[in-house]
Structure formats: C-alpha cells, structure tokens
Amino acid sequence: MHPLTKTLLATAATGAGALAYASLYERQAFVVREFDVPVLPAGARPITVLQISDVHMTPGQTRKQHWLRSLVEYEPDLVVNTGDNLSHLEALPAVLHAYEDLLDVPGVFVFGSNDYFTPTVNNPARYLLGPSGMRRRSPDLPYEEMRTAFTDAGWIDLNNATGRVDVRGLSLSFAGLDDPHIDRDDLAAIPASADPTADLAVAVVHAPYLRAIDAFNVQGYPLILAGHTHGGQLRVPGFGALVTNCDLDRRRARGLHQHRTAGHDSSWLHVSAGCGTSPYAPVRFACRPEASVLRMRPVDSPRN
C-alpha cells in the first residue's frame, strides 16, 4: 500500500474514532465539578449552591434524567438554573421529572433561547465566525408552562427581574436577565446597583455577553452565574475552547474566573459548561457534560 494511502486511512480512522468517542461516550459522561467561592461575609456559615445549565432535554434522554435526579445527593442549599432546559416540543415532562426533588430546594432561574425556540440545523463552521444568532420567529416551546411549574414549586423567576432568598441564616439578593443571545435582556428592568442590605448579591444570566456581565460588575455584584457556552463543547487539549458563541473570551468559556471593568472591584464569574447539546450536534470532546457545585464560604476563611 502506498505510504500516502496509509496516512490517509490512519487519519480517517483516528477521526472516526474521535467522533465515536465524542458522540457515543463523552456526551453522556456526566460529571459534577466543584468550586470554592470566597464571597460570603466574615463569620457566615458556608452554603452549597448547585448550578444546572444547558440541559437541552429531549423526551428519550433517560440517562440524563437519572443523573440530574441524583444531584440532590449533594444536598444543595440553593439551586440556580441558568437556562436552555428544552430541546423538544414534548420535553417538559422529562425536565420536570428530572428536577422533581430539586424543585423542593429553594431556587432561582433564567431562560435561554432554547427555552423559547426549538433548535434548528446550523452549519457548525458558522460558530467559528461569531455568535450563532437566531432568525426571528415566534416562540414554540412550552416556556410559560415551565415557568409556572418552576414558580409554583417556589423557584424565583429572574428573567429581567430581582428576588431574594434566605439560606442558612443568610439573605441572598438576586438580579437576573432574560437571554442576551436573543436580545431579550432588559437592564433597565433591574436596579442600578446591587442590594447593599443583602449578605450576598448574585447576578444570573444565561449567555455571558459582555454587555450583561460588565453591567453586573459595575452594579456591584460579587458573583455572576451564567451558562450558554457549553464550555466550547469541542475543546482542544492544551488549547481549550475554540468558541464561546458569544463575545466572552475563550479562556473563560467554562469554570470560575474573575471579571472586572475599569474602576470597579472584581466579580467572580462562573460559567457552566452545561450538560446537554443540540440534538443536531450531539457531540462533546474534552468537555464532559457537567453540573457545578459552588461551595460558598466567607472571604477570610480557609478552604475546607
């Protein structure tokens, strides 16, 4: 066999193997990532926050549903849902089944584009050119039914809104935005500054566009939680995410980082890589599907 033919066959086999790994194994290799977040006032008792994001549920994803149900074992004091729960017109019962025990825990939520619109086929190369955007159409997913189910359970709707939750003797204030990725964010709907009477002020948004996280930093939120990026979904070992599908830099496509605008104190920014994919791109590579457990502790206390 000609050496070039051997090289081409070897390259094709490697590519096929990587695709099989990404589509058959890694996209269902769920993991929980834990982070130490020093944001509470001195003397406060630590609290555990579970962040779930980008579930992109379809009715037949029973393995994902079972894993999501198991997250209650982390005994969270609070659940933060940063959106994109749905990927199918009939997925809401599966979402509510997966969240059943978590809905008994205090929680807050915002929506993402895939809470409003069923996913459509996109050219994957399009993501290399910038955020994917979305053509104008009417919402077709049951987001209002989902909103009602969440709020009836006691979760607070933060879509262009504020809220307050008492957790383990601490008062937490929240401000949230609807999804900037589809221009549903309205900064004018939330106060110009974080609540100074709260023990901790938290900002929540689905897509971490700079206009949103810059505003939250200026407004004085010590902690900002977001999703949307899928951590890049396809990551190159040693390089990281290729894209973020927004204007956030690739280095912060997932995990805990700091965010600061000129003249203001830094905010902690946590971006969840989420635990799902579009049904039209059911692959993950070097970026396992995840939920995040954020261990909140006082600023001046040592790590456990």
Image (cartoon, rainbow, N blue to C red):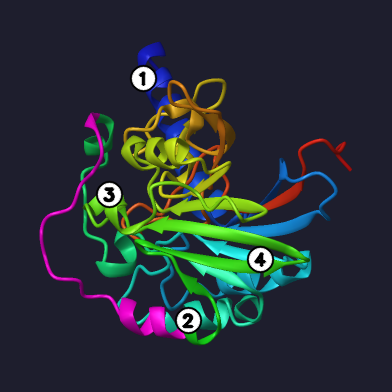
Calculate the distance from the C-alpha at mark 2 to the C-alpha at mark 4.
Answer: 14 Å
Q: Amino acid at mark 1?
A: Thr
The reply to whether discs 1 and 2 touch (Cβ–Cβ < 8 Å) is no
Q: Position of residue 185 (x, y in %)?
A: 28, 54
Between label 1 and label 4, give the one nearer the viewer.
4
Q: Quadrant of residue 93?
A: bottom left
Between label 1 and label 2, give the one nearer the viewer.
2
The reply to whether discs 1 and 4 touch (Cβ–Cβ < 8 Å) is no
Question: Where is 142 relative to 269, above or below?
Answer: below
Residue marked by disc 4: 78
Residue range of the region highlighted in magenta in the rendering: 129-149
Q: Earlier in the sequence, mark 4 or mark 3?
A: 4
Front-lying residue, 84 or 8? 84
Residue marked by disc 1: 5
Residue positioned 85% across, 38% down in the render: 301
Q: Is residue 132 magenta?
A: yes
Residue positioned 37% across, 22% down in the render: 8
Q: Position of residue 171 (x, y in %)?
A: 67, 62
Q: Earlier in the sequence, mark 1 or mark 2?
A: 1
